[in-house]
Amino acid sequence: MHHDQVPIDLDTVRDLVQGQFPQWSTEPIVDVPADGTVNAIFRIGSDLGARFRLRAEEPDTVKSRLRAEAAAMTELSDHCPFPTPLPVAIGRPSGSYPMPWSVQTWLPGSVASPTGLAGSSEFAQDLGFLVDSLRKAGTRGRSFSGTGRGGNLVDHDHWMKLCFENSEDLLDVPRLRALWEQFKKLPAAGPHVMSHRDLTPANLLVSGGHLVGVLDGGDFGPADPSLDLVAAWHLLDREGREFLQASLGAGRVEWLRGAAWAFEQSIGLVSYYRTTNPGMSALGRNTLRRILGDPDIRAIHKAVSGSE
């Protein structure tokens, strides 16, 4: 998926586990197929999962990041109303895999899909409960820092220009570019709150029509209160979105900023993963269809373009 991707396979993982964590050497280890773009995941026995970063980085940088992720995961578990993985260990680099890697607890459940529970009010209620619970966790005086999603929309303007250029043969770029010009002008929605920061289908587990687990909590931290609303656009149809918006009491600006963050993420998914990860590219397309088909978004587009 990436030009700087580091190879990792089942035999390498078995050797790493046996050499560094002999207490798990008799456990079966299996590759876990997924659409994830950051880590390769392998299951160790029934209770553990090992994660290996896909893109090459300096080992010390990765180690610092894994430690920060472990702290964030622990904090998330204290406030999340659904089960989340907990950090267990950090593995060392080796000749076969040149970066530190992590071991976490494993959660049961099936990864959510963009359409599987799109019309479920029960699932929308679960998402609302999740977002509201995370928002209520104290920021302890922290605010968003960094360059990823969760700060200012306009800071992503250069990235969006690149995405538009790479999507000329894939999407209706003039229409999307015009919408982005309006999205990036939206005012702040309020003080930063604690946020999962990546509530995409791949990071949510479901069973029996309900949310049963929340994955990839290593970025849990303060951000734009609209950021976790990307879940509405990635996972719910119009009725589900309306239910979620009402349950959170989200105002118009906050709701539109959530759509803007989902829009920013989805444009990149479509173009970057067009051949290397079709599932992620399809997620981006599906989310863009929801955004462009929403009455509030259509009203914005009509106002700026004069189209019917």
Image (cartoon, grey):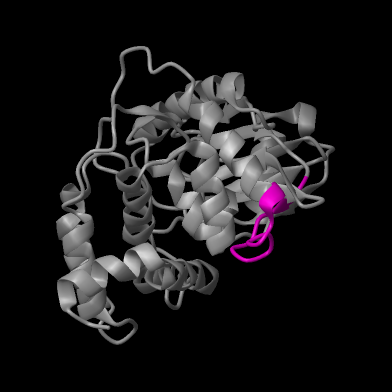
Query: Is residue 289 found left or right of 11 in the rendered image?
Result: left
Query: Is residue 180 found left or right of 107 in the rendered image?
Result: left
Which secondary structure is most common in the magenta stretch?
A: loop
Q: Where does residue 253 sit, x and y in percent of width and height?
A: 30, 46
Give above or below for 34 relative to 258: below
Q: Is residue 53 visible?
A: no
Query: Is residue 95 found left or right of 256 in the rendered image?
Result: right
- At x 39%, y 56%, the residue is 262
Q: Where does residue 275 sit, x and y in percent of width and height?
A: 45, 78
Q: Residue furthest top?
A: 140
Magenta part of the protein: which range?
109-122
Give above or below for 253 relative to 1: above
Residue 118 falls inside the magenta stretch = yes
Q: Is residue 235 visible?
A: yes
Front residue (pair 159, 237) = 237
- Please identify the quadrant where the N terminus is shown: bottom left
Front residue (pair 43, 265) = 265
Residue 57 falls inside the magenta stretch = no
Q: Where does residue 6 sit, x and y in percent of width and height?
A: 45, 55
Q: Where does residue 158 sit, x and y in percent of width and height?
A: 15, 59
- At x 29%, y 82%, the residue is 172
